[in-house]
Image (cartoon, helix red, strand yellow):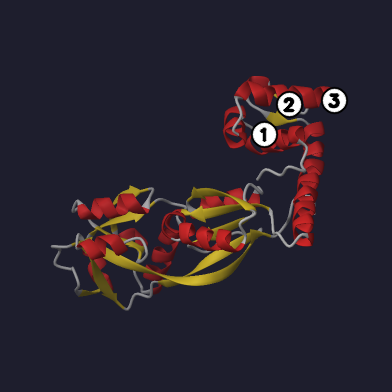
Amino acid sequence: MSNALENFRLRVFRILARQLNFRRAAEELRLTQPAVTSQIKALEEEAGVALFDRAGGRVTLTPQGALLLEYADRLHQLAEEATQALAALSNNTAGSLAIGASQTIGQYLLPNLIAGFLRKFPGVQLTTLGGNTEEVLEALANHRVDVALIEGPAMRRDISTEAFLEDHMVLVVPAGDPWADAEIEVTDLLKAPLLTRELGSGSRRVVESALEQAGVKIKELQFTLTLDSTEGLLSAVEAGLGAAFVSRWAVRNQLTLGTLRIAHVRGLKLAHDVDRSSSRSQPGR
């Protein structure tokens, strides 16, 4: 989220204050760790106070650093507003936008969304951050992204959400499975090996909520394997390790190739909203 109008040393300070890790801050800033250290040292000399405490192998903000971060966030916001105002005056929308996206959206939807956005606003600099729903929302709450696209409910009071399209989860099985293209009862799931996403995944929340509404006790299901990506789930199903619930978007290629098939679960409502989330509080406001 670089902005040419933002003081560079304050930007380095702001990123390090969020990461509290010199290596990760350097990666985000595309600098070397010594360069980050040099910028922070120069800023501390200018301010005449220590901004970070490096004792015990941990990086923490001093009280003076925490105070400066409030002002640095406000200055960053002002720089963004100034850039957008100047661009609007010249009829050329500009600035930066950081987008967080949960994994399925980031892999299967976000590229097309970004392409359409950049055709309309070519002057905007976009950056993206991926993870599961919980991780993306944490980044949003900490102002590391400006907006987040998630598959499941936000489950946080500091986040506001708005549905922007509907997704549908489906149960996929190997092509030769007896359930392939068949209609099964929801109780049949109790007897089958199931694969699932990790805790914190929005799609997992959607599936578990739908199963509970259908009268299934989650603890009675036979979850044999947990994976941290949709691609991992699809590969595991293809290998015959079990059945899995995934987004219809994610399985399009496998359905076309015929390596996976859908099992239709009678009485299970798996349609859900895909949400655009934003933080309820903005930096410095």
Work out how far the residue at label 2 is from the one at label 3, CA to CA, in angstroms: 10 Å
Work out how far the residue at label 2 is from the one at label 1, CA to CA, in angstroms: 9 Å
Where does residue 186 sit, x and y in percent of width and height?
A: 28, 72
- Whether pointer 1 and pointer 3 mark residues with C-beta atoms closer than 8 Å, the reply is no
Give, as a three-letter code, the residue at label 1.
Answer: Leu
Name the secondary structure under disc 2.
helix
Q: Is residue 17 left or right of residue 184?
A: right
Give, as a three-letter code, the residue at label 3.
Answer: Glu
> Which mark is on residue 185?
none
- Residue at the location (86% across, 24% down)? 48
- Residue at the location (76% across, 61% down)? 88
Q: Residues within 10 Å of mark 2 (few under 14, many from 20)?
A: many
Where does residue 43 sit, x and y in percent of width and height?
A: 79, 27
- Whether pointer 2 and pointer 1 mark residues with C-beta atoms closer than 8 Å, the reply is yes
> Which mark is on residue 40?
2
The residue under label 3 is 46
Residue 214 in view: yes
The residue under label 1 is 16
Where does residue 53 sit, x and y in percent of width and height?
A: 72, 25
